[in-house]
Amino acid sequence: MSTLLPLFPLDLVLFPGANLPLHIFEPRYQEMISECLERSQPFGVVRGKDQELAEVGCTAVVLNVAKKYPDGRLDIMSQGRERFEVMQFNQARSFLQAEILYLRDEPGVASKAEIARALELSGEIMSLAGAEPEQTSTVDEQQLSFHLATPLPIDLDFKQSLLGMKSEAERLRALNALFETVLPGMRRAVYVRGKAGGNGHAG
């Protein structure tokens, strides 16, 4: 069996633990996913941008095949697992492969204050957006940042930088800084909408 990781370039950033539904329609990726299913092996999701591929990606495993079409297309549900860095691309197959190095966090954990701040700010953002706050009781505390960032419409460049950071403390600090930047604008927008829906006067 090859030690190369098959790659699926996509216009997104996949985080560990995040679910990713995919519609597989290109023959080369039908072949790739079929092999992954047969061998119970992961594939790698890397962000593609302007004909270039990110050097840091995330492996994904197929959780289930939701639908098989007569022409070979597939609807699958996959899930992010482990971060990796591409060491060398390999174009020997119809789909791209790579030699990779798995990324591990540096020792140390985020402070309780940083964790509490991230939960508070992300909860407010979800509330202002009209969504339910993320449930975090079963989340590995070393991956809380990924869990909080997954559902948010955050800039993909920021998500890519988050994926490559080497500690949870660093990721949470970056997230908190982002939250503090975007929240004032969200609060203003909700306030203005509230005024527009009322009598035009602040209460």
Image (spheres, grey):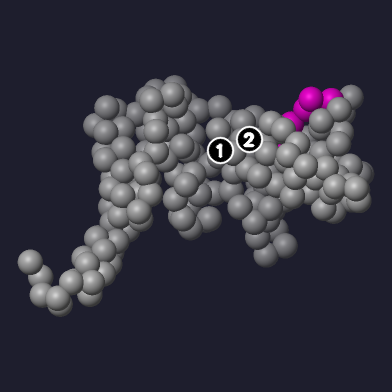
Query: Residue 149: which quarter of the image?
Result: top left
Measuring from the top left, give residue 143's x and y in whole percent. Answer: 46, 30
Report the Cα–Cα distance between label 1 and label 2: 6 Å
Tell me whether the residue at label 1 lies in contact with that at label 2, contact meaning CB atoms closer than 8 angstroms: yes
Instruction: Determine the residue located farthest toward the left in the rendered image.
Output: 203
Q: Can I make out residue 203 in this image?
A: yes
The residues colored magenta run 39-44
Kind of residue at disc 1: Ala
Instruction: Look at the picture and state if 153 lies above or below 39.
Output: below
- Neighbor class of circle 1 (other Cα within 10 Å; few <14, some 14-19, many 20+) is some
Q: Nearer the viewer, residue 110 or 19?
A: 19
Kind of residue at disc 2: Gln
Instruction: Look at the picture and state if 65 lies above or below 108.
Output: below
Does residue 171 appear left or right of residue 28 in this picture?
left
> Which of the labelled discs sits on residue 18, or is there none?
1
Does residue 64 appear left or right of residue 179 in this picture?
right
